[in-house]
Amino acid sequence: MIGLRLRRALRRLRPEPVRPAILMYHRVASPPVDPWGLAVALERFRDQLDALARRRAILPMDAFVAALKERRLPACAVALTFDDGYRDNVTRAAPVLAAKAAPATVFLTAGAIGGELAFWWDELARMILLQRSQIRYDLVVGGRQVGGDLPAMAPGEAPDPAWRAWQPPRTAREAAYVELWRLLQRVQPVQRADAMEALRRAIPPVPADHEELPMTGDEVARLAAAGIAIGAHAVTHQPLTTLAAAERRAEIETSRSVCRDLVRGPVCGFAYPHGDRDAETIAMVREAGYSWACSTRGALVDPEDYNRFDLPRLVARDVSGAALLRQIEEARP
Ligand SMILES: [Zn+2]
């Protein structure tokens, strides 16, 4: 048996061939908490684009997929995507992209655009992780009773912007956030809305940062006019496999028509909310007339073996440009 360390050393001596990659961003921001690691700070985003522009060929998604189909995609190709439709994509990401002439696609949660409400996972993070006073709640989520009684934060105690929800929680608030998120993620949209309303009644509000809200229809039109492609990301951001077939189809088709109306042009791409998909859902996206779709499977694109309705993406984390390039080089198809 060849040892793991020896295998790693051999791998370093014989580097993997360069392969194309699709990068997944959400926010360009520095929020006070970020349990899902969705934000890249503005300075790091600039540094990442500098590094990518130097070492890689940044292609629009449509051109990336067309070249993939015609078997002429350069190995150094990357495509940039942003999920959900956060306002900071317009105010912070778009100017940097324009300055570098870097193409990108923004996938919109169609039902959230122009709304007053933050995405539920962000609002939940504010309520549980940022509210300093004592928190008490008692609610039913999808038939399950869930309660919490969290003491006020002590003077000097502060939420940890570096904590991630996949790491073990170190505070009662972090544990409560993970518990509520897990319950809320899989219930139906109506049940989630009811549960969020119960939490709003129970917990004093922490105002949202303007940039963490979904963009407006006008802002979508501005992005499109600036040359940023718009894709669909369903209507309610519900994990699609939790829905009955008719509702799932409606999420896929309606989000496309909403996006088309906003950009007054074609909408070719789709991204599965939470990356949640199965063979039936993938077939529905194809049948709805999209040209390609992205998942959240963290891998490079293998030009010899891919499904253009199930394209993998690497998460771009809040790291330097050099670290992002290394991450891409070390990733696997
Ligand atoms: Zn999303």
Image (cartoon, rainbow, N blue to C red):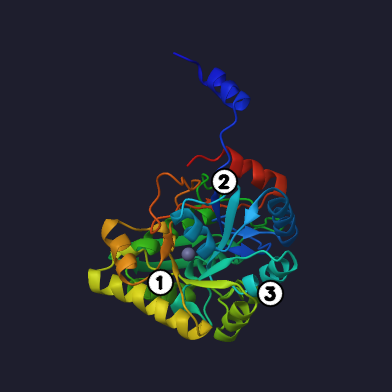
- Residue farthest to the top, as pictured: 1
Left/right placement of residue 120 relative to residue 43 reads left
Q: Which residue shows up at 53% across the image and 62% down it? A: 63
Q: Which residue is mark 2?
A: 75
At label 1, the amino acid type is Ala
Secondary element under disc 1, as helix, strand or loop, is: loop
Q: Is residue 177 above or below residue 188?
A: above
Image-quadrant location for residue 217: bottom right
Q: Are marks 3 and 2 in contact (CB under 8 Å)?
A: no
Q: Is residue 196 above or below residue 58?
A: below
Q: Which residue shows up at 55% across the image and 76% down it? A: 214
Percent across and percent down for residue 138 are: 40, 67
Q: Which residue is mark 1?
A: 234
Quadrant for the N terminus in the image: top left
- Report if the beta carbon of the residue with label 3 is closer than 8 angstroms to ligand 1: no
| Residue 192 numbered tag | none
Marker count (numbered):
3
Q: Which residue is mark 3?
A: 91
Q: Is residue 120 above or below residue 161?
A: below
Q: Are marks 1 and 3 in contact (CB under 8 Å)?
A: no
At label 2, the amino acid type is Ala
| Residue 270 in view, yes or no | yes
* Of callouts 1 and 2, the N-terminal one: 2
Frontmost of labels 3 and 2 is 2
Percent across and percent down for residue 74 are: 57, 49
Secondary element under disc 2, as helix, strand or loop, is: loop
Mark 3 Cα shell of 10 Å, populated few (<14), some (14-19), many (≥20)? some
At label 3, the amino acid type is Thr
Percent across and percent down for residue 245 are: 24, 69
Q: Which residue shows up at 61% across the image and 52% down it? A: 317
Left/right placement of residue 236 relative to residue 325 reads left
